[in-house]
Image (cartoon, rainbow, N blue to C red):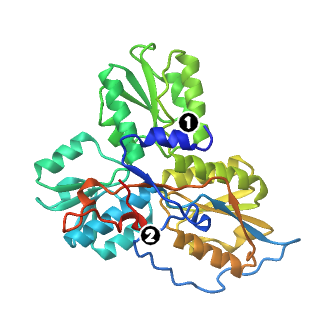
Amino acid sequence: MGCMVETQLAETAAGAGMTDRTRDQRTIGAPVVTLAMPRMRRQSGRLKNVPVDGEKKVLLAAPRGYCAGVDRAVVAVEKALERYGAPVYVRKQIVHNVHVVKTLEKMGAIFVEEVDEVPEGANVVFSAHGVSPAVVNEAADRGLHAIDATCPLVTKVHREAVRFAKQDREILLIGHTGHEEVEGTAGEAPEHITIVNSPEDVDTLEVRDPDRLVWLSQTTLSVDETMETVRRLRERFPNLQDPPSDDICYATQNRQVAIKKIAPQADVVIVVGSSNSSNSVRLKEVALEYGARAAYRVDFASEVQQEWLDGARTVGVTSGASVPEVLVQELLDDLADAGYADVEATVTAEEDLVFSLPKELRQNADGQRDARALGGRVRA
């Protein structure tokens, strides 16, 4: 699979409302977002300097942090609050990050599990992970004003599921049962979709017709594990059809490629990201698989334990695709206190992809295109 190249992005972008922008190279993996993300109050000197043989340094992954889909979803909630006023309801977490959710709650967002918790006629935002048609219909039945912040790359997978179902193909959806994205995709064609959770599931899989199979995948999975699952599926079902393009999103791939390069050189890798963030959890697993002596996932720098740094000369740092850069900077500040002030960027790709806002938010009160959206640039 590897990093998604420009031509692949162009194919994926078709009909998905994508635009691009040029960013200063220093911001690679850390998109500019209008949401006010306050810096955490630092407890200076919390981590003590650890004596080690040789110089200490941090290998900082790029790309890291916010992807275009997360950027779009977070800004969508902010813009909805600005336009309609509080409260604005959000079904599920808009993105899987504790800090982002808490910040939006302070701004007036109310997070609910299902749309039946939203007062009739209110404004509701669907999260970046997508929803099934049943949820869309339920929101309409309650007279809700729905704003669809589903990542366009997830929407692409939904469309593929619908198309293959119309062809009466059986769809093997590689993903984690219970994840919002998988629930939304499976809901597009439940009678045609079977979820495959892991490579080990392949051995016991039962299908209707082995000659009419196609696979799709959750966008935030481990690239390596997904390809291993596909390999096993093809061993059992040689006529398995591939989707027209990789479903693993460009940001997930890029962040995994970056940590693969860092891991063999790092004594310890620290991944900033929440426990329910699939791509953040995968980054920790990939780091261990590719040679890091130890790897940890934290929501906040304050969770880093002193003993993690014992004997470590090189600390690798990255963050999941739903993590604002302010949380990484807090970690770098704490690591500097512990003597890791030398920060070396490991750049494996440049990202300049931007998605336009949901159609419900693309016009301002005067009916004009809102040029402030997504970093101040919106292109037709």
Could you say which disc has been placed on residue 295 in the image?
Answer: none
Quarter in which the N terminus is drawn: top right
Q: Residue at the location (44% across, 69% down)?
A: 99
Question: Where residue 184 sits in the image (x, y, percent)?
Answer: 33, 42
Q: Residue 213: horizontal and vertical position, in percent?
A: 44, 20
Q: Which of pointers 1 and 2 lies earlier in the amino acid sequence?
A: 2
Q: Give residue 153's quadrant in the image.
A: top left
Secondary structure under tag 2 reads: helix
* Location of mark 1 (residue): 226
Q: Is residue 252 above or below residue 297?
A: above
Judge left or right: residue 321 versus residue 346. left
Of the pair 375 and 327, the residue shown nearer to us: 375
Disc 1 packing (10 Å; few <14; some 14–19; many ≥20): many
Number of callouts: 2
Q: CA distance from mark 1 to mark 2?
A: 29 Å
Q: Amino acid at mark 1?
A: Thr
Q: Residue at x 38, y 22 (%)?
A: 170
Check disc 2: other Cα within 10 Å, few if <14, some if 14-19, many if 20+.
many
In the image, 153 versus 362, the foreground residue is: 362
SS for dot 1: helix
Residue 64: which quarter of the image? bottom right
Q: Hey, what amino acid is under mark 2?
A: His
Q: Position of residue 148 (x, y in %)?
A: 28, 52
Q: Mark 2 sits on what residue?
A: 99
Identify the residue at image location x=63%, y=53%: 349
Vertical comparison of 63 with 242: above or below: below
Marks 1 & 2, CB-CB < 8 Å contact = no
Q: In the picture shown, does residue 19 fall above or below 225?
A: below
Out of 357 and 241, give the one closest to the viewer: 357
